[in-house]
Image (cartoon, grey):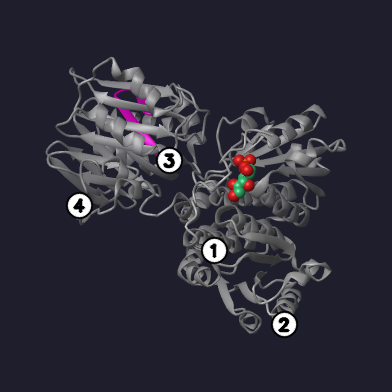
Amino acid sequence: MCGIVGYVGKRNAVPVLINGLKRLEYRGYDSAGVAFFDRDNRIGVRRCAGKIKDLESSIKREKIKSFTGLGHTRWATHGRPSEENAHPHRAGGIVLVHNGIIENYFELREDLKRKGHVFTSETDTEVICHLIHSYSKDGRSFEDAVREALKHVEGAYALGVINEKEPDKILAVKKDSPLVMGLGDGEFFIASDIPAFLKYTRDVMILENNELVSITGKGVSISNLATKKPVKKEITKITWSPTMAEKGGYRHFMLKEIFEQPRAIADTIRGRISPEKGVVNLEEFSMKAKDLEKLSKIFLVACGTSWHSALIGKYMIENMAKVPCEVDIASEFRYRNPIIPKNSFIIVITQSGETADTIAAQREAQKLGAKVLSICNVVGSTSAREADSVFYTHSGPEIGVASTKAFTTQLTGLYLFSIALAKAKGILNKREIKELFSELLQLPEKVEKALHINAQVLKIARKFSQVHDFLYLGRGINYPIALEGALKLKEISYIHAEGYPAGEMKHGPIALIDNNMPVLALAPDDKVLEKILSNMEEAKSRGGKVIAVATEGSTKVLAHASDVLFMPKTNYYLTPIIFSIPLHLLAYHVAVLRKCNVDQPRNLAKSVTVE
Ligand code: F6R
């Protein structure tokens, strides 16, 4: 997730772009850059690794005067954070900024290299620049070169492109990455999100996939990318306050991040599988099939919510690939003298890549001779740099302290890893893998559908927001979701909550149940459904108020709970992703009703860099 911005108008462009980038810094902040037409109508590019304020101070002294330009704030996906990998990218007279992920960049780059193109970065983006440049050399107009180049590009993009031959013009186009346009008085903006230009205009056009926008100081024209047919668009008047706009109109980052999950999961899958061939692209894990074949044991190590992912990972790996797993809390692993047999492997899971206990556990494992795979969200973080292989989740920056989209994208990564391992070991055949892929490809849409439960969850939150304790029950692969639901409620609403394997209730926790104790049961339609229904009944008969999360169509749950939240059906392994959604929403709404600081709960930090 990166942020792009573009400006054409009467103001000095660079300060407008820098201001826009600051408003988009929540989308990424590991490097930044701007491009602008100078007095001689040549394109100047200034980039630097680091935050936008670093870019601002490095160019301040130059006193650049320009009326057209592009800006970018980066959240690395392909290529570490560095000046060479920062946008804008240039090929000949073509300069562009990009937000998204290009799936077929590797093949495109190799092809362009054979034709003599020289690449200066490790990014997927640079291929688009070279493609447009190569097509504009064939005598095509700027617009047609963009149209032709994008015919060859697979993946998601929002692009702003400028061409030295046509000063004061920006072309912008999108597919599956957000892009909006701001219309001022004789000035025009493009951006990944509205806050980038809200200071200057509240008149906005939301661009759709495959719309090509051509912007000059005189006006804007929009056409279909493929057919060139003109597109008519409504102007929307934005009434949000600047702080609301930064959160995309949501009240808190946590809620925004919960609703971003369809996009985050789709981006994490993008380019990582070849559905027709039935393979997971192992280079995305920086691994080879032969590394996986010989694996005989896996340790999954993490903290907090990431540890819940690890627990679910064990179910996925052991069931799909039949490799035994041990799951450790990182702060325990490092001090317990773990016995790591030959051919075993450590997976550390960390959103930030900077959690002190996780890093220490990773180093301990490496000291003991084990290879480490880091499933991590932050490119270039300590865990990612020091690991032997890395799988990046593409959820984009997570700002709310309570982890949500990072969690479900970690689970997506573990699902892919389990399939890759099962294939390398010859346990899953092509047909079985295709079925697993087919369900995975439907996941973003099912998550979108699951989010429709929000209003119903709010009603339940109103009923229970003043309780003192909460019990969460789950079984099998959904037991860790009970732990996750309880952790989220504890950390943001300060209500005492416990997650339990439902079968364990009768060995102690049942003593706590009375009519002040809500019990949330995860009751998907799987082989242990009857068992969890009995556990719900046990709680109900002791006065407990039972809320169930169940699979749509599974009506027998209704008789055992006072409230039932029905979720879209998916396969066994992906159920935890769908079932975590109402639990994250419940914690969120309860916390808001209790007037808690949702995004920055007391005593907590986003990244725990101390032991
Ligand atoms: C809970 C939460 C924390 C983190 C934990 C590990 O909502 O966010 O429990 O999961 O601090 O952080 P990472 O994944 O950055 O290592």
Crowd around label 2: few <14 · some 14–19 · many ≥20 (10 Å): few
- Name the front one of labels 4 and 3: 3
- Name the front one of labels 1 and 3: 1
Q: Mark 2 or 4 closer to N-term?
A: 4
Q: Mark 1 or 3 closer to N-term?
A: 3
Q: Residue at x 63, y 76 (%)?
A: 545
Indicate the secondary structure of the residue bearing disc 4: loop
127 or 352, nearer to the observer: 352
- Name the front one of labels 4 and 1: 1
CB of mark 1 near ligand 1 (< 8 Å): no
> Is residue 256 toward the left or the right of residue 168 in the image?
right
How far apart in space, not on screen, are marks 4 and 1 (Cα)? Answer: 45 Å
Establish if 521 lies above or below 367: below
448 or 497, nearer to the observer: 497
Label 4 belongs to which residue? 230
Label 2 belongs to which residue? 541
Determine whether label 2 and label 1 are within 8 Å by CB.
no
Label 1 belongs to which residue? 586
Residue type, numbered disc 2? Ser
Label 3 belongs to which residue? 27
Q: What are the residue bounds of the magenta stretch?
A: 87-99
Residue 503 drawn at (x, y percent)? 79, 69
> Is residue 224 toward the left or the right of residue 410 in the image?
left
How far apart in space, not on screen, are marks 3 and 2 (Cα)? Answer: 49 Å
607 or 259, nearer to the observer: 607
How far apart in space, not on screen, are marks 1 and 3 (Cα)? Answer: 25 Å
